[in-house]
Amino acid sequence: MKRKSYLLFAILIAVGVIYSSCKKETASPQPDKPYVPVHQQNTAAGLGTTHGFPTGTQYSLPSYIHIIGSIRGGILGKSYDVDKDKYQGYFPYVQSEKSWTDYGTGTYINLYIKFYNSLATGVTLTIPGGLIFCDSLDIIDSIGIYQKGYIMQAVNIPIAAQDTAFAHILAYCLNLHLSPSNYNSVYYIGPITNNPELNQITTIMAPKQYPYGQEGSIQSIIWNVTDYGLTLDSANIAYLNSLP
């Protein structure tokens, strides 16, 4: 009697396994959808007071270009160096080894970057228009402390063979209500923006001269996009198109 019971039990298990296998074979596998944070779907992320990391294509330097130290902020109208007897910031006082060369245009963001060229020949490094530099304290969904920097037009930086270029890059502000760059701020390279309004500004200004003397008007247009939620109107577009 026990033998028959065991046999019946074994048959039931076998039937269950076969049925389960058939179900798996006939079912269409559904791949898991990748998780995309909401802020990565929002092209306003990281701009103005909108939380999140700016969207776009991450930019990387060529393999032969290296940044020495950190990307440091500065204060408009003042040099990168600080008074070591008065400085009370978080980072060690650093004496700059050479004079800094200015590149580009901007308002409240001053980026001091030492680019080293490891090649045996001189090169010209191009920082593309549309690139955003982010505050190192701006992590994931936080808003950060210091204003993000927007490179409106491409910047070309010549670097001699196996030498260092001391580049002071000016950038436009993307966060009206955050703090301007200063020696306490450390930046990192973010994405080339895919925000449609900023892209339109970048595209219009790409073939033009640097708009010296017009930075304030341009900054107001950028803040209209980033902080006031406005689109570029016909007057803004006409103004940008009118620049030489």
Image (spheres, rainbow, N blue to C red):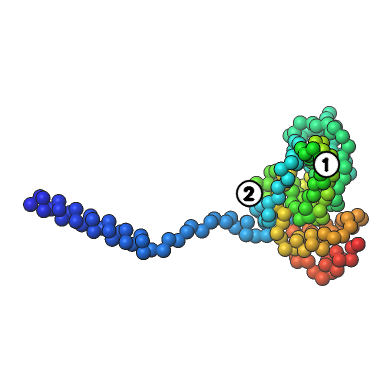
Q: Secondary structure at mark 1?
A: loop
| Number of numbered discs overlaid on the protein picture | 2
- Which callout, 1 or 2, points to the residue nearer the camera? 1
Image quarter in which the C terminus is found = bottom right
Pick whichever, 178 or 105, lies toward us: 105
Residue at (28, 61) in percent of width and height = 19
Please report whichever mark, 1 or 2, sits nearer to the chain's N-terminal start: 1
Q: Position of residue 104 (x, y in %)?
A: 85, 50
Give the residue type at disc 1: Gly
Q: Which quadrant of the view contains residue 242?
A: bottom right
Residue at (27, 56) in percent of width and height = 17
Q: Secondary structure at mark 2?
A: loop
Q: Which mark is residue 141?
A: none
Q: Position of residue 32 (x, y in %)?
A: 48, 57
Pick whichever, 25 or 34, lies toward us: 25
Picture layout, residue 37 above or below residue 240:
above
Find the distance from the CA under tag 1 to the CA under tag 2: 37 Å
Q: Which mark is residue 122?
A: 1
Q: Is residue 24 visible?
A: yes
State the residue lying farthest toward the front: 120
Q: Position of residue 236 (x, y in %)?
A: 83, 66
Q: Which residue is mark 2?
A: 140
